Image: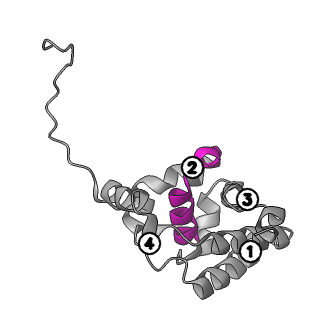
Amino acid sequence: MNVDNVVQYPSNQTPSDASLALMEHLFSLRSLPLQEHINELADLSLDIQSLDNLNQLAILRETAERQQLFERFQASSWFVQEGGDYLYRPELLRSAPLTKVVLLLKETLTYRNWNDLLQIAHPHYLSQLLERLRDFAEAKSAAMSK
């Protein structure tokens, strides 16, 4: 220990590519989607919640592609290395920042086989992800008054 009561640990660990990709997006406002796109997806998620997961995913992907929502998100390595926590423990989504929610939505909607993804994910993963997305949407009454 030194005089400042700080224990110096040698840091030979470099951040993973996944962590670097996430950090790049977390600190870039350009990576965030437009509020109107978040609002549209959030409203749509309520309209389609009675559908099965595969149909919900298809409708959401079509909308996200039309919006070009994922144009600036290239974080597949983050999803593979660290995003799985959210797949298996969707309660973590309750405090996830918008950037992670969008990254998870992107990776979920562009996953090559939704059946496989839904089999390994927690049964409440998709509903929790969409619920968290709705947390970032403007209330309709507030949006209409603008």
Magenta residue span: 90-108
Query: Pointer 1: what residue?
Result: 56
Q: Is residue 125 left or right of residue 140?
A: left
Extreme residue toward the right, this view? 50
Q: Tag on residue 96?
A: 2
Calculate the distance from the C-alpha at mark 3 to the C-alpha at mark 2. 14 Å
Asked if marks 3 and 1 touch (Cβ < 8 Å), the reply is no
Element marked by disc 1: helix
Amino acid under label 3?
A: Ser
Q: In this image, 138 relative to 69: left or right?
A: right
State the image coordinates of residue 35 (x, y, percent, origin top left): 63, 69
Residue 90's place in the image compared with 137, above or below, is above
Disc with the residue nearer the chain's start (1 vs 4): 1
Is residue 146 left or right of 70 when viewed as pictured? right
Residue 12 x, y percent position in the rendering: 14, 40
According to the picture, the residue beneath numbered tag 4 turns out to be 73
Residue under the image location 57 percent in, 59 percent down: 101
The earlier-in-sequence mark between 4 and 3 is 4
Viewer-nearest of discs 2 and 1: 2
**Which residue position holds label 3?**
127
Residue 7 colored in magenta in the image = no
In terms of secondary structure, where does tag 2 sit?
loop
Disc 3 residue crowd, few under 14, some 14–19, many 20+, Cα 10 Å: some
Instruction: Determine whether the residue tagged by mark 3 lies in a helix, strand or loop.
Output: helix
Q: Main secondary structure of the magenta part?
A: helix
